[in-house]
Image: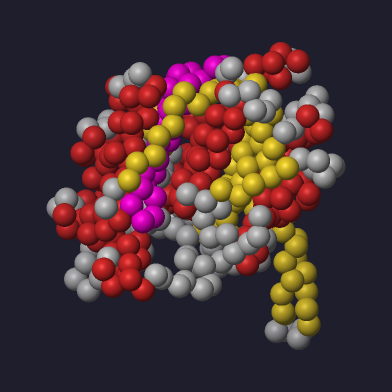
Amino acid sequence: MNAYIVSGFRTAVGKASRGGFRFTRPDDLAKNVIQHLLASMPQIPQEEIDDLIVGNAMPEAEQGLNFARFISLMSFNTYKISAMTVNRYCASGLETIAIASSKIHSGLADCIIAGGTESMSLIPMGGWRIVPHADIALAHPDYYWNMGLTAEAVAKEYKVSREEQDLFSFHSHQKALKAIEEGKFKDQIVPIEIHDNYYDPETQSKKTRTFQVMQDEGPRADTSLEALAKLKPVFAAGGSVTAGNSSQTSDGAAFVMIVSEAFLKRHNLQPIARLVSYASAGVPPRIMGIGPIEAIPKALKLAGMKKEDMDLIELNEAFASQSTVVVRELGLNPEIVNVNGGAIALGHPLGCTGTKLTVQILNELKLRKQKYGLVTMCVGTGQGAAGVFEMLS
């Protein structure tokens, strides 16, 4: 039984701690995207949706418990739609699409909404209370390394210079700024209305302002190679990984609807795309950024395809060092990788990212009238993930 993506949307990506979503709960972001998705397909009765699967990388505090179930209760007009939270760190959003597609392929469901949401404003990287296993930490301290240290390890082991990393970062911003100027993301972004309470020192009183977040906040028009070169390393003394050539901490949400062929025909729906294959792979945690080097060949083999068959690739830019290495080691065509910029410019809302990249690549493939796309990312503690998509309309 085939599984088809019939709709997908995302929020803009907000800058963590200082952007438009800094006080907005991730379940509220998710609710807004899901309700927009439902409104775009009014012919689908909500009671026929079988499940909601939500990716999240730091499932605690505002993202704690099985918060997917609370998103379900907030988003639908019925309590009958079950839900589960999935965590494969940065690949969580792509993992939910793979799980939903697999369940539909096997006949266990007809309609699933899958995606991810993350607030890096409200929940810090690693969560509020990290408790490493003492034996593991003593024997393998690199298992618990800060992600920036793994990026430094990749740069050192694969000989990626500071200049290469800064150049990669500069191009990411330039491509993202061009995409925004051309309105490439406009149709895929759900505008989110924000009601922000703040203290006005002039009147010494509380005030409320209302505004919409409808454009990705990360890309900087003032980014230059000279400015990037002036930034100091932030993870290791004498290192090469800076805030400028690393992905931005971010807030956001993205979701897609996946249905069976029977559901498609019953409701006279037009399929957008399908997930052809998905694979995950393990690599040494110390150099976790190389994860796509192992995951991409697995996904392509499962699809019976080669890298040359891909029209576009969305490679999550966790760091410029690891992105450079993935492109170089696999011999990917840089002209088709992140054509609209990547996470260094646009941001990386962790558990949301895999779905966000999926929504982006499907929209770009449609615009270019191309057929095959690859979404891939490295994953903390030494993993990689990759999914191959085929356009159907």
Residue 380 lies within the magenta run: yes
Q: Position of residue 152 (x, y in %)?
A: 24, 61
Q: Quadrant of the N terminus?
A: top right
Q: Where is residue 232, by image quadrant?
A: bottom left
Up/down of 249 relative to 5, above or below: below
Horizontally, residue 54 falls left or right of residue 233, namely: right
Colour scheme of the picture: secondary structure
Q: Position of residue 249 (x, y in %)?
A: 47, 60
Q: Position of residue 82 (x, y in %)?
A: 73, 42
Horizontally, residue 4 falls left or right of residue 175, namely: right
Q: Residue at x 55, y 35 (%)?
A: 99
Q: Residue at x 33, y 31 (%)?
A: 298
Q: Quadrant of the C terminus?
A: top right
- In this orientation, which residue lies closer to the viewer: 243 or 29? 29
Q: Residue at x 36, y 73 (%)?
A: 134
> What is the count of numbered marks?
0
- In this orientation, which residue lies closer to the viewer: 32 or 342? 32
Residue 137 lies within the magenta run: no
Q: Where is residue 24, by image quadrant?
A: bottom right
- Residue stretch rendered in magenta on the structure: 368-393
Q: Residue furthest front?
A: 135
Q: Where is residue 233, by image quadrant?
A: bottom left
Look at the image and tell me whether residue 233 can be seen.
no
Q: Residue at x 81, y 41 (%)?
A: 80
Look at the image and tell me whether residue 201 can be seen.
yes
Q: Position of residue 242 (x, y in %)?
A: 31, 64
